[in-house]
Structure formats: structure tokens, C-alpha cells
Image (spheres, grey):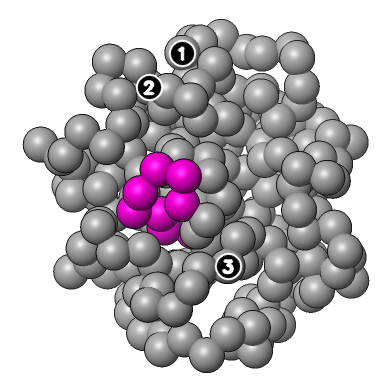
Amino acid sequence: MFDATLNSTNPAKGSRFESLLQGSDKVSTNAPWDTILFSDGDFVITPTLGSLVPLWLLLVPTRPFLNFVQVSEEYGQNPISLVTQILSQRFDYHGKFVWFEHGAATTGSVTGCGVDQAHLHIILDPTFTFESFHMAVMSMANYTWECVAPEASYDNQNWRQEYLAFGNKEVAVRTNLTNPPVSQFFRKAISGVVGRDSEWDYRNFPNGKIAKETVCFMTARIKNRVTP
């Protein structure tokens, strides 16, 4: 069992996801980014607050974890394999996607944007190439990055060490953070790639219209999916 870094009786207590996860069997109508598109009791998928591009989703565990290294160890399943499985089975989606995580190791961490709950970003059918995203990330900071297979993206990682990780279906890239962290690191990279440099902060640019479009698209995928 992991150290009690979060309240184990109240999922994601104090985080932006607290009310969402407590009602994870319901669909919120308060805001598009609080719409639950998938829930199996262990994880939910929702649109993200601050979507810079369409089809930007979050995978969030319902139990209190700070990062997906913890999640991977607890469930014995690689998060990227889980994402691929859910997208295929729930949404009949087999296309490209980019994923990333700001891996926090303490509550209130700048790395985790102060959210205090693990959440993995997933962008389906991105409007930018993975190569352009990769180049933008590499140009932002002088970190030492390691490339591994997606199925090994969270292997041999210490959840007490903050990290950044990103990738697609073919590769995962990760680094442990020894330098001062940067808030919303990958959002800043994507905002530059898509020509919306000033809109990286989800607090100031919620982009509800884009999140609503994502809800409509993913809901249609559920309705029209092919049952094996």
C-alpha cells in the first residue's frame, strides 16, 4: 500500500476532480469538462478544462493517487495499454493519439499544477504531428530524456520522484525532474505548436466550446460503436 499522501477515504479530496469523482456514476451538466464519458469504477475519462485542440481528454483514477507510476504499480497495468484498450472497446477508436503527464510527487506540486490527483492527458487525432510536439518539448528545457517502448513507459520509475512523460502509440519519452519544475509544461509546448502561444494556462482559457465539441464527438462514438 502506498503512503497516505492523499485522503484515502475521500477520492482526490481538495483536488479539481473531487466532486467529479465522488459522482462518477453520474454525468455532470455544470460544465462540458465535467462530463463523464467513461467510468468503470477505477477510472473516468472526461474532456479537459483548457482544451487547446479538439478531442483532448483526461484519464483520471477514482482512487487518490498523485501520479500514474503509483497507478501502474497498484493495478499492474501499463496506463498507455489501458488507454488503448478503453478507446478501442468503449469508443471504437483505433486512430492516432498523443499522451502526456506532469508527474507530481507531492501535494501542491508546481509540476502537477496543484491539482493533487493523477491525471493522464490524451489527445485523439491531434491537429499537430508528434514530431512537431517532440521538437517543441525538447527545445523548452535542458532535461535528459529517455525513450522507451510505450508498454514500458512507467517501468522502473520511483513515484516519489517527480517526472515528465509523453508519447504516442509507438514511443514513450520521459525524464526525472531534478531542476526546478515548470507548471503546465506540456500545455506550453502544445500552445506553441498550434499557434496559440498565450493560451496555455487552463485557468485563464477554459475553452468550453472546444470541450463541448469533444463531448459531442465522443458521445457519438459511443452510440455508433460496433459491438463485437
> Disc 1 marks which residue?
22
Structural distance between the alpha carbons of marks 2 and 3: 26 Å
Pinpoint residue 81: horizontal percent, then vertical percent.
Answer: 35, 54
Q: Which mark is residue 11?
A: 2
Most extreme residue toward the left, as rendered?
1
Secondary structure, mark 1, is helix
Amino acid tagged 2: Pro
> Disc 3 marks which residue?
182
Would residue 78 appear left or right of 60 to someone viewing this image?
left
| Main SS class of the magenta portion in the image | loop
Q: Which residues fall within the magenta stretch?
A: 101-109
Whether residue 217 is visible, yes or no, is no
Structural distance between the alpha carbons of marks 1 and 2: 7 Å
Residue 148, above or below 7: below
Q: Residue at x 88, y 64 (%)?
A: 198
Q: Residue at x 55, y 19 (%)?
A: 20
Quarter in which the N terminus is drawn? top left
CB atoms at circles 1 and 2 under 8 Å apart? yes
Amino acid tagged 3: Val
